Amino acid sequence: MQDYDECTAFLGSWGHFQKSVFFLLCASILPNGFGAFSLIFLTDSPSHHCLIPEVNLTQDWREAIIPIKVVNEKQELSRCSRYKLDVVRNLSAWGFIPGRDINVTELEQERCMDGWSYSMNIYHSTIVTEFDLVCNEQWKQPFTATIYFLGVLVGSFFSGLLSDKFGRKPVLFATIAVQTVFTFAGIFSPSWTVFSILLFMSGLGYISNYISAFVLGTEIFTGNVRVLFSSLGICLSFSFGYMMLPLFAYFLRDWKSLLLGLSVPGLLSLILWWFIPESPRWLLSQGRVKEAEDIVRSAAKKNNIEAPQVIFGDTTADEREAQKNYDLFNLLRTTNIGSTTATLCLVWFSLSAGYYGLSLNTSSLHSDPYVSCFISAAVEVPAYISTWLALRNLPRRPSVVCILLLGGVSLYIIQVVPQGLSNLSIALEMLGKFGITAGTSLMFAYTAELYPTMLRNTAAGVCACVSRVGSCIAPFLLQLNVYFKNLPYVILGTLAVLSAFATFFLPESFGRPLPQTIHQMHKRDK
């Protein structure tokens, strides 16, 4: 098979065609920054206590009817119980005064029989206040995020296979449409069950369109532009979308309004169908040489360059390769490809659990969730810049190892920080997120460079699918802090360190052309 980069070298690497595709693909990624992280605001639980109905109670008894409990060494109103209303009403009617005539702590308690009263200091409403996901129903809060990531898992699995079979572009825009439509449909959910089903469907498109756009750009661009796109372009677009989320949430404090606002950018992204081409590499891998040449000639025209009469020359080998059937099992069929796939799955699982665990934990950074979310998003910018510099100048394997060790060790150190130095703990947590974010960005480029064209999107989809298992457990992983405050950090740090050592078993890809056949991948692995 001919080398695609050599055949298209006459185009240059940064003409009008490459610039337009670069920025349009980046624009299509912006809505992904909202996706999973919107759950920070949609599923947040405001301060709440039992609702006291309009009955004849004195002001003293109305203030005393909610028990006081000590949580994390602080006194606060009980969230799930009240003193028995019938008893309190009788005591109030008889003129007894709480604390003077009656020791209220000895009164019988009952659960919240009339619902809950929620604070509106931060949110006007969330799905927690809408569907009363508190007390006995509190388990539904983290499970909502898990349902979303299960949708992402299923979408990642099938989108990779579909993209390798039907093309990068159709799957990119189909998954954008799925994410947008079902995000909007969530507004009309009459119950938590319906909302969860629609959230699962929305998750089918999340990350799937990110991976399709990533692979499409990786295959269209060459040289340093490919590195720029895979490390800075697509990642910073995701980060900018993430940083825009708290701005949307600040002005749209009702959960339905927030979902509506987050649907608009996805709808606008669908217009890009008419401006983003299919991957010529993928067309060649399918034996569709004329279509690939047409796209390259159109690119040459946009770059004011005259294309040669014959661009890809003898395509007999390409057509033979296209006639072969490739599927998921090709990732495991031989020892070296199977070991590479298994190692990548472990690394991606660890990175995803760490990334989403730390991202969904932003409420612990600052009392204002909007500030917390912005801090967590902003720390990704230097991480992606570091990734870009590493991809340009350093081998892939040692870069991934070092950055994962940085993230893992930072999370380990949190447990030895004195309780009074909370700012130091936050700094270490953000340093850990910096390392895991940079590692994730490096692994996107690294994974794409290891596999040949006909397996690249399938491999990326499988790795994304396995990584979603990590993101599915992340919400419940955070709940382990009830047993030991720093246990989530210990687990995430351990996973990061294990992944760093596993990376030693991956082949190096720095400075080498993308493999176009399985034979080329075998040759490089050896």
Image (spheres, rainbow, N blue to C red):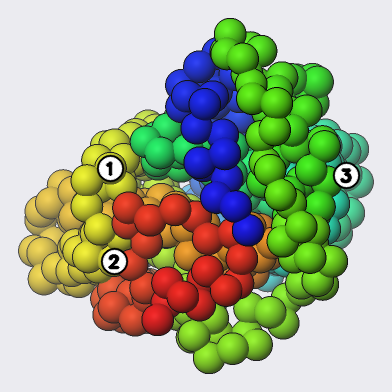
Which residue appears farthest toward the top when viewing the image? 304
Does 503 sit left or right of 299 as displayed?
left
Q: What is the spatial separation of the Cα atoms under label 1 and label 2, in whole angstroms? A: 13 Å
Q: Which mark is residue 189?
A: 3
Could you say which is closer to the camera, residue 486 or residue 33?
A: 33
Residue 444 in the image: state x and y as whole percent.
Answer: 47, 54
Indicate the amino acid at tag 1. Answer: Arg
Identify the residue at horizontal 83%, vertical 46% (top origin). 288
Does 188 sit left or right of 214 as displayed?
right
Q: Quadrant of residue 25?
A: top right
- Disc 1 target residue: 392
Q: Residues within 10 Å of mark 3 (few under 14, many from 20)?
A: some
Give SS at disc 2: helix
Q: What is the spatial separation of the Cα atoms under label 3 and label 2, in whole angstroms? A: 46 Å
Does 129 sit above or below residue 173? below
Does 443 sit above or below residue 205? below
Could you say which is closer to the camera, residue 362 or residue 273?
A: 273
Q: Which mark is residue 218?
A: none
Q: Quadrant of residue 105?
A: bottom left
Does 119 sit above or below residue 134? above
Identify the residue at horizontal 13%, vertical 51% (top origin). 424
Indicate the amino acid at tag 2. Answer: Arg
Please report whichever mark, 3 or 1, sits nearer to the chain's N-terminal start.
3
Residue 208 in the image: state x and y as whole percent.
Answer: 69, 51
Residue 12 in the image: state x and y as whole percent.
Answer: 47, 24
Q: Quadrant of residue 471?
A: bottom right
- Disc 2 target residue: 397
Indicate the amino acid at tag 3. Answer: Ser
